[in-house]
Image (spheres, rainbow, N blue to C red):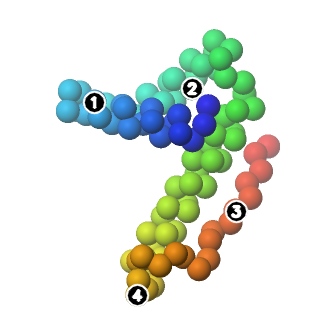
Amino acid sequence: MSLDWAQDFLRREAARIDADPLTNSVFSRAQTLFRKRESGEAEPGQLPALAEEVHLTLLDERADQFRRQHSGADAALPPTSRLSLTLTFA
């Protein structure tokens, strides 16, 4: 399981909203992860790493968006600083 897998899964599920307006892509992904864990296809240690990768990617994207919106700088220029976090799961 990887960030790419999680993002692709969410995009596929979200694309079904026209056919099923009650589609909840995040809940569906959680169910899929639970099934993978129950079947032995996913190890418990994989889940915190996936959650951390998704979370940090979203934080970085939001920080870039905030920086573009509020810095008054040219959005085409690369950011001069990056958010760096270290998370430890117990």
Q: Earlier in the sequence, mark 1 or mark 4?
A: 1
For the C terminus, the image quarter is: top right
Discs 3/4, front: 4
Q: Which residue is mark 4?
A: 72
Q: Earlier in the sequence, mark 4 or mark 2?
A: 2
Q: CA distance from mark 2 to mark 3?
A: 25 Å
Image point (56%, 54%), residue name? 57
User: Which of the two discs, 4 and 2, sits closer to the camera?
Assistant: 4
What mark, if any, has residue 33 been given in the picture?
2
Number of dots carrying numbers: 4
x, y percent for residue 24: 36, 33
Circle 3 Cα neighbour tier, 10 Å, few/some/many (<14 / 14–19 / ≥20)? few
Say whether residue 18 is left or right of residue 34.
Answer: left
Q: Amino acid at mark 4?
A: Gly
Instruction: Name which of mark 2 and mark 3 comes first in the sequence.
Output: 2
Q: Which residue sits at x=72%, y=27%?
A: 44
**Residue 22 shows in the view:** no
Instruction: Name the side, left or right, on which 69 lies relative to 1.
Output: left
The span from disc 1 to disc 3 (Cα, nearest Å) is 34 Å
Residue 9: x and y in percent read: 45, 32
Q: Which residue is mark 1?
A: 16
Say what amino acid the circle numbered 1 marks: Arg
Residues packed near mark 2 inside 10 Å, few (<14), some (14 to 19) or many (20 plus): some
Q: Which mark is residue 85?
A: 3
